[in-house]
Image: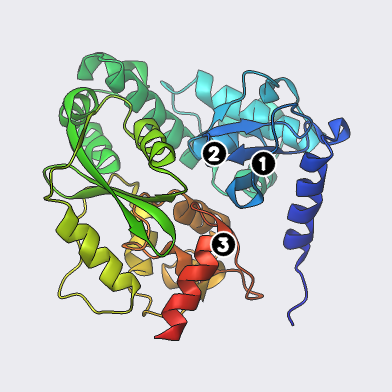
Amino acid sequence: MPLPTPAHDEEDARWQAVLARDAARDGQFVFAVASTGVYCRPSCAARRPRRENVRFFPIPEAAERAGYRACLRCRPRSFSGSPELKMVRAICRYIEQHLDEPVTLDRLSKEFKQSPFHLQRKFKAVLGITPREYADSSRLKTLKRNLQAGDSVTRAMYDAGYGSSSRLYERTASQLGMTPDKYRRGAIAATIRYACADSPLGRMLIAATDKGVCSIQFGRSDGELLEGLRREFPFALRKQDEGGLHSWAGALLKHMAGKNLDASLPLDIRATAFQRQVWTYLQSIPFGQTKSYREVAQAIGRPSACRAVARACATNPVAVEIPCHRVVREDGTMGGYRWGLERKKALLHMEKSF
């Protein structure tokens, strides 16, 4: 039996702190709940979530980068934590306030009185990305929010800190998966069809645009699945499918039962370049086999990006079709799974049975 890793022990300790509503741990980490899309501090008085729905983050910015929003009840942003975490949060605030300027590592080192090497190392140890990557992520997040709010492309790009050159426009288009003006129209008026069906893992939802599948989720009820779809596509027009999606749902169920498909389902998903790199590799992992987060990071040429690989797995919008369940910890334990650890265990057990 493999020994628990220090990271696994820390997660257990954090979970016990959440169960105990330990105010002494406030500021040391936050926990996010996949079923609600909200993150909280350990002492939050809200009802305790199911363990398989919980993810832990060192600071609020990391939770928000993964798509969660702050709890209005416990206000986790009001707690700063250790001096090191305080510094990383301060760097994040500084970057966010200067998105329209070139914030170089030298500039940050002078502002925070740290050598460029040590500043970047501490920042990456907490968030798993460099300050430059955080700035790119923050610009994209602001751009998407402005486009979803109905701003013009020009205004949204300027407000997010982008210039007006064609090079920047092309770069933004690759991050969004489409041009900004198309993203704006789609975010406001796109039609997404969906269907729910029974599966070996509970209720399953499959949703698609005219171009392909954009969401595959598992849940306990149709209501839970539809709420997840609403959070994922808040501005889209969501319509129950009249039958066209059932063939895709059937193909997915056959694939879960160990039957090879002639071709993958057509996908219409947005991804950063790094997410797309990880997800493409995951689709190459053979049926019934697993890889560790470290092995995935090494395979894509980013050996130090284990945490970023884990985040890419956690943000995968199309369960099973992109098989993030085939990625586990080095010691063989499950790690996390967006749709619950029990489902991950069940999927791996099913695949190894064929």
Q: Is residue 272 left or right of residue 44?
A: left
Label whose residue precedes the other's in the sequence (3 or 1): 1
Number of numbered discs on residues: 3
Q: Is residue 113 in sight in this rendering?
A: no
For disc 3, the marked residue is: 342
Q: Provide residue 172's location: percent of width, then percent of height.
A: 27, 35
Q: Amino acid at mark 1?
A: Leu
Label whose residue precedes the other's in the sequence (3 or 2): 2
Badge 2 marks a residue whose secondary structure is: helix
Badge 1 marks a residue whose secondary structure is: helix
Q: Which image quadrant is residue 351 in?
A: bottom left
Q: Provide residue 87's location: percent of width, then percent of height.
A: 72, 31
Task: Categorize mark 3 by other alpha carbons within 10 Å: few (<14), some (14-19), many (20+).
Answer: few
Q: Which image quadrant is residue 171 in?
A: top left
For disc 1, the marked residue is: 119
Q: Answer above or below: position of 162 versus 326.
A: above
Q: Is residue 156 left or right of residue 246?
A: right
Q: Is residue 32 in sight in this rendering?
A: yes
Q: Answer above or below: position of 320 versus 187.
A: below
Cα gap from disc 2 to disc 1, whole angstroms: 9 Å
For disc 2, the marked residue is: 131
Residue drawn where x is 35% and y is 46% of the image: 272
- Between 16 and 102, the one nearer to me in the picture: 16
Q: Quadrant of the N terminus?
A: bottom right
Q: Amino acid at mark 2?
A: Pro
Cα gap from disc 3 to disc 2, whole angstroms: 35 Å
Cα gap from disc 3 to disc 1, whole angstroms: 39 Å
Label whose residue precedes the other's in the sequence (2 or 1): 1
Q: Amino acid at mark 3?
A: Glu
